[in-house]
Every structure is written in C-alpha cells, then in structure tokens.
Amino acid sequence: MTGLRRIARIVVAALAFAGVLPAASGAGDETTVRFSARVSWIAANTMVVSTADSPALSIDLTQVPQDEYQRLVTGAYVIVTGTLGWRQIMATSIESLEPET
C-alpha cells in the first residue's frame, strides 16, 4: 500500500469515527458528506482544509460556483458539502461561517 493511499484511508477512517462520514459505503456510492473545516489554502480549483480530526483534506471545487469561495481567506471557517472522490472530496457547496463585511 502506498503512503498516499494509507494516509487517505486513515483520514476517511478518522472522519467516519468522528461522525463526518458514514461508517460504510459501497465503491459505487455517491456518499454525501457535510462537515465544518478551516481553510488552509485555495489555488485554482482546489481548496485544502483542516478539521479537528485531520490535518488536511483536499477539496475539488470544480462543481462549486466561484462566488461561494472567491472571498475566502486562509483561516476562514466553512461548511463543505459534497461527495467522496477517490483522492479528495468533490464539493458541491462551500458555505462561509465568517461574518460578511
């Protein structure tokens, strides 16, 4: 097992344990996930966030309208909604928990 695959399994297990992800899902499932996290960085169509249980999760932003994340900054708290992908979470919505100024 490669190091990246092992880390991905650990992260998914930690999220399942924390109640962010369901404990069981089939390989073909479009398992929906929703969790709060803090933005580590955003570049192009990828955002990396951290949760209380994991140091970093990669979020694919290609299905999210840009106006949902264009004003986010490092350290902002968000709610991510999406589905599990092979190496990352495929986001469908990013909600900022920061007050608008």
Image (cartoon, rainbow, N blue to C red):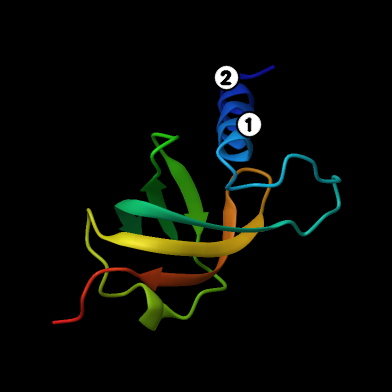
Q: Quadrant of residue 99?
A: bottom left
As rendered, which of 67 and 23 lies closer to the eye? 23
Would residue 45 be found to the left or right of residue 98 on screen? right
Q: Quadrant of the N terminus?
A: top right
Horizontally, residue 47 falls left or right of residue 85, namely: left
The type of residue carrying mark 2 is: Gly
Estimate the spatial distance between the alpha carbons at disc 1 and disc 2, rounded to whole Å.
15 Å
**Residue 43 at x, y = what percent?**
34, 58
Residue at 44% over, 57% down: 46
- Label ID, residue 13: 1
Pick the quarter of the image with the C terminus: bottom left
At label 1, the amino acid type is: Ala
Q: Secondary structure at mark 1?
A: helix
Crowding at dot 1, Cα within 10 Å, few <14 / some 14-19 / many 20+, comes out as some
Q: How many marks?
A: 2
- Name the residue located 81 percent from the left edge and 45 percent from the top edge: 25
Q: Earlier in the sequence, mark 1 or mark 2?
A: 2
For residue 22, above or below residue 29? above
Q: Where on the picture, by quarter, is residue 54?
A: top left
Q: Compared with residue 10, is residue 66 higher up or lower down, i.e. above or below?
A: below
Q: Secondary structure at mark 2?
A: helix
Residue 3 against residue 101 in the figure, above or below: above
Residue 62 picture quarter: bottom right
Residue 14 in view, yes or no = yes
Where is residue 10 shown, x and y percent of the image? 59, 26
Question: Quick check: can you spot residue 45?
Answer: no
Picture disc at residue 25: none
Marks 1 and 2: which is nearer the front? 1
Which residue is identified by label 2?
3
Mark 2: give few (<14), some (14-19) or many (20+) Cα within 10 Å.
Answer: few
Viewer-nearest residue: 41 or 37 = 37
Relative side of 65 to 91, left or right? left
